[in-house]
Each structure stands twice: as structure tokens, then as C-alpha cells.
Image (cartoon, rainbow, N blue to C red):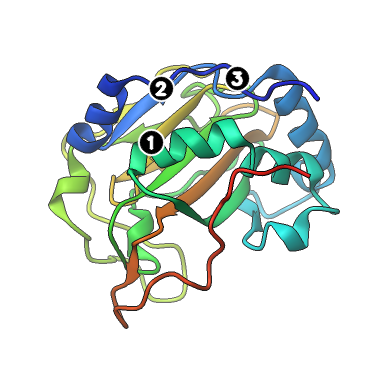
Amino acid sequence: MSKLTDFVLTPDMIEQFYREGYFYAPGLLSAHAVDAINAEHAEFAYQQGDGKWRSQAIIDVEQERDRFPATTDFLTDPDIVSLLETILGDSVRIWMGMYAVVAPYGNGLEWHQDNQYTHILGHMLNGFIALDPITQDNAGLWLAPGSHRLGRQPNLNAEGGHKRAADPENGIPCKPMAPGDAVFFHRETLHHSKQNHTGKPRRAYAFQVAAANCRYAATGKLLEDRAVLPGYRR
């Protein structure tokens, strides 16, 4: 079986994650892995929609192995899991994985934090992986450096829809990303994406993991309903 990643995590990247709330991981996934993940989600990527951002989620990795073998192999790959554990300094739990698509000429999401959804206490991260060449022409990601240190922000949208935070003054566009490139950012880092100005869907994979000692803010309980990623493959 081919190796999914040759990416080398450095101490400077980990320091930047905690200081600035993000870091780049160029070449995180191999071309073979990118092609296999796109192939599994091709029907979803190209189906007719309403022009809005949409995603196909995985929460229970074991339950989805037969349906999405390449995607779940990536999420449980020992090398990937090891680097996630190194960043968060603990065993990690999978919160979710999302095959995320911005439709041709469609819009991305407004400024928000992932922690505006379910409020989690502790360190979590989001890995955003380009599955196409991604620039600002096709809904490239924007980040607000240091915004994770402001804490959880209020939701300015009506309940029931996507969350929205106030626009930060220091938002910056991410660098152009080749397929397989990634950016990791903290669960409380403000981020958003603008419009896809092309006639093709913009495909990416976003996954969220939590340090195993994270707790639900509402109850104080550990995230024991989410599986620890043990770094195995079938």
C-alpha cells in the first residue's frame, strides 16, 4: 500500500499553531491519496445543488469504512495520527471529517469559528486539505491570525443556520494551494471562504480532531462519544 504522506512536522509549525492559530502543511497528502478521496466522493462533488457550500460528513469512522475506504484510511493513517498527536500533545479523538464542496460560481461560508457550533473546552484543530488547485479564484480559505486567543465569539446569525462572527480586521487569504497541500488551524481561529468564480466545483477535505482530554462546555464531560484515533489501518 502506498504511503499517504511524507510531510515532516517541525517544532516551529507547532509553535505557530499555538501563537498564530494556524500553520501550512504543504504536500500533506500524496497525489494517489487525493485522487482516491476525490473518486469516492465524485457523485457528491458534481451533483446539482443550490449553489451553496455543502459537505459530506464522516463521524463514525468504522461505520463508514466500507462506503469510503480511502477517506477512512487517510483519517486513521498512523503517520497522520502521529502528527496530530504531536500537535495537540495527547491522543486524539475524531470529531468529524467533511468532504467540502463550493459549487461553480457558488459562495463559501462567512467568518466563523468551528467552536461556535458545539462549544468544546480544550485544544482542537481543523485540517483543511486542497483536493483541487485552490486560489482566491475558487473560494480559497481566509484566516485571521491570532484570533483563536480571543476566545469563543458570539454568533451573529439566527439560530439554525451557519454560524457567523464579526469580520476581523486582520483577515488574510491563504497561499495558493496545490492538491494535497493543507493548512491546520485551531478550532477557535476565525476563517471563511469567498466566491468560487470558476465553472468547476472547488473540492477540499476538512477534518476536525480533539485532544482526548477535551470536554463539552455544557456538561463538563469528556468527548467519550467520539472515538480515539489509534493509528491503525485495516
CB within 8 Å, label 2 to label 1:
yes
The residue carrying mark 3 is 133
Q: Amino acid at mark 2?
A: Leu
Q: Amino acid at mark 1?
A: Thr
User: Going from the N terminus, do you reach mark 1 or mark 3 first?
Assistant: 1
Question: Which numbered circle lies on residue 86?
Answer: 1
Percent from the top left, x then y, of residue 89? Answer: 33, 43
Please say if 196 is above or below 155: above
Q: Which residue is mark 2?
A: 9
Quadrant of the image occupied by residue 28: top right
Crowd around label 2: few <14 · some 14–19 · many ≥20 (10 Å): some
Q: Which of the two discs, 1 and 3, sits closer to the camera?
A: 1
Q: CA distance from mark 3 to mark 2?
A: 22 Å
Residue 194 appearing in the image: no
* Mark 1, other Cα within 10 Å: few <14 / some 14–19 / many ≥20: some
Q: Residue 222 placed where, x, y %?
A: 38, 72
Q: Is residue 62 above or below residue 132?
A: below
Residues 131 and 16: in front is 16
Mark nearer the N terminus (2 vs 1): 2
Residue 9, placed above or below residue 151 = above
Whole-percent x and y of residue 107? 52, 44
- Depth check, front residue: 99 or 234: 234
